[in-house]
Amino acid sequence: MDKQYRDTNGQTVLHCAVKHTDVVKYLINECNCDIMVTDKGGIPFLHYVASEGLLDVLKCMVMTINGHNIMDKQYRDTNGQTVLHCAIKHLNVVKYLINECNCDIMVTDKDGVPFLHYVASEGLLDVLKCVVMNNNGHNIMDKQYHDTNGRTVLHCAVKHTDVVKYLINECKCDIMVTDKDGVPFLHYVASEGLLDVLKCMVMTINGHNIMDQQYRDTNGRTVLHCAVKHTDVVKYLINECNCDIMVTDKGASEGLLDVLKCMVMNNNGHNIMDKQYRDTNDRTVLHCAIKHINVVKYLINECKCDIMVTDKD
């Protein structure tokens, strides 16, 4: 294993023998080759084996580490990754490491990202299913499975509709689960404009109205409020989910012209200045838009709003 016996890529004889379990076994047991020996890219042999999905070779190495835990700090690479992180794309290896080696699915890399959350963020559904199936009956949404930002596996999977669907339908994950800032998952999806994921959630709420009180955040905001910067989501919520455009939160509003146009177009011919569209202070949409010239211009020119319209005072 001395430097003089390495090739031009810094590989040792152990690296070259990687696909031959009997040779690897001989080199480790008889020649005392170090399973953490690195190539010139700094990748330990152990991690290379895991990333290649070579289960038989990995088993051989686990058997030769003298009772040490394969997840111990000494078996991490320079990025703080464990053998479990490296095996992420190989189901059989992940299953072996969790079931036989008792690897912790919440083990973190040097950036503090748990293995479980990394799997979800990468959209690796088959691996996630494997992890959930081997979780000893624990709820994958329990606090012990939150990351340092209070995010659940559901938050991390947000850009992968198939994973979100699995977590909601099969794992009964709550769409109102919050991160440490108190933002519900449902509202986070809407604010990010992730229409496909939102549709998936709407389909799974068992006939409840997505605008019901139980689906409001701590500021009384609905999913419609959160989606305000995403016209396609607003259009879907109004047209398909029958969301009321007069729904109120605890606060005020912004001058989002495209969204306003979308609502006017889906207003069934009613006049946007009608009494039913006034707030509790009897203010019209024109009053509220006062600081946004483009919105005011649109309301006067296109919607024929009367500039002499009054509020309750």
Image (spheres, rainbow, N blue to C red):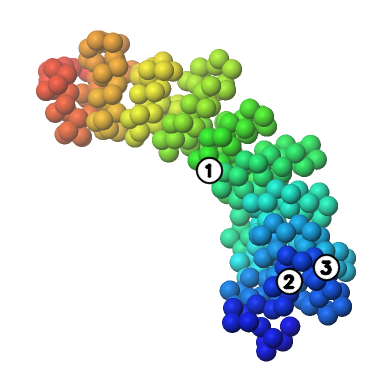
- Residue 124: x and y, percent? 60, 44
Name the residue that disc number 3 marks: 22
Q: Is residue 19 left or right of residue 148?
A: right
Which sits earlier in the primary sequence, circle 3 or circle 1? 3
Note whether 16 is above or below 169 in the view shown.
below
Residue under the point 57% across and 21% down: 205
Q: Up-down: is 61 above or below 210?
A: below
- Kindly identify the amino acid type of the residue bearing the numbered disc 1: Asp
Q: The disc labelled 3 sits on which kind of residue?
A: Asp
Residue at 83% from the left image edge and 79% from the top image edge: 32
Q: Which residue in the protein does label 2 denote? A: 17
Determine which residue is flagged by label 1.
Answer: 181
Q: Residue at x 65, y 62 (%)?
A: 81
**First-in-chain label (3 vs 2):** 2
Secondary element type, mark 3: helix
Which residue is at the front of the view, 211 or 134? Answer: 134
Dots 3, 1 in contact, CB < 8 A: no
Q: Within 10 Å of the Cα at label 3, are there few (<14), some (14-19), or many (20+) other Cα atoms?
A: few
The CA distance from mark 1 to mark 2 is 50 Å
Q: Amino acid at mark 2?
A: Ala
Question: Which element carries disc 2, helix, strand or loop?
Answer: loop
- Compared to residue 120, the image places residue 86 above or below, namely below
Please state the horizontal and vertical placement of residue 106, each as a whole percent of the image: 70, 51
